[in-house]
Image (cartoon, rainbow, N blue to C red):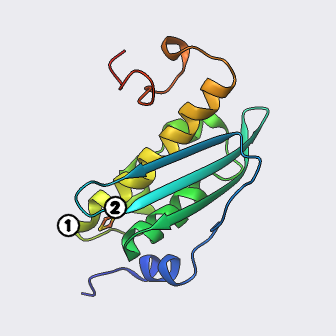
């Protein structure tokens, strides 16, 4: 069996939603200290719906495929759905990733959660009231 599924190869070769949203409503950037890869997600939100999402990923093929798939999974969806997006869902949608590449899909989940967190903060919602775990200003310790 091939190491990477056709879906991974497709999203790696033709990533969806690559780019920057200049006037984004939420931005999340995460990095993996071990591999050094970096992922940045931009969200445009209107009335609790993710109307647009873009990503920039400096990383491996699996990280690019994961970002691409993750953005497809939340585009046009309500915030509640984006909050629940897990790296398992991203991996499943890609028809799997090799075990040593699972951490790449975690990066996508984390970047989206961080962008949501940024959005809630920009709305003036205090940490304890945001529906996501705040990592930026309280290190997730709330
Ligand atoms: Fe670092 Fe894939 S190897 S995100």
Q: Would you say 98 lies left or right of 109 here?
A: left
Query: In terms of secondary structure, where does tag 1 sit?
Result: helix
**Would you name the residue on which mark 1 appears?**
100
Of residues 131 and 119, the one drawn nearer to the viewer in this rendering: 119
Q: Residue at x 48, y 79 (%)?
A: 12
Residue 62: give x, y in percent of width and height.
Answer: 38, 71
Q: Would you say 13 lies left or right of 24 here?
A: left
Q: Would you say 54 lies left or right of 128 here?
A: right
Q: Is mark 1 within 8 Å of ligand 1?
A: no
Q: Is residue 22 above or below residue 13?
A: above
Q: Residue at x 71, y 39 (%)?
A: 25
Q: Would you say 129 lies left or right of 52 here?
A: left
Of residues 67 and 121, the one drawn nearer to the viewer in this rendering: 121
Q: Residue at x 49, y 39 (%)?
A: 113
Quadrant of the rendered image containing residue 136: top left
Location of ligand 1 given as a quarter of the image:
bottom left
Q: Residue at x 58, y 57 (%)?
A: 71
């Amino acid at each position: 069996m091939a190491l990477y599924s056709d879906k991974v190869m497709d999203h790696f070769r033709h990533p969806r939603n690559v780019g920057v949203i200049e006037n984004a409503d939420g931005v999340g950037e995460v990095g993996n200290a071990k591999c050094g890869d970096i992922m940045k997600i931009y969200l445009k939100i209107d009335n609790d719906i993710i109307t647009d999402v873009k990503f920039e990923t400096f990383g491996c093929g699996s990280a690019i495929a994961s970002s691409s798939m993750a953005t497809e999974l939340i585009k046009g969806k309500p915030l509640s759905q984006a909050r629940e997006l897990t790296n398992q869902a991203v991996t499943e949608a890609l028809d799997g990733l090799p075990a040593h590449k699972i951490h790449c899909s975690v990066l996508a989940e984390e970047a989206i959660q961080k962008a949501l967190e940024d959005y809630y903060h920009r709305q003036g919602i205090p940490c304890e009231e945001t529906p996501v775990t705040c990592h930026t200003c309280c290190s997730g310790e709330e």
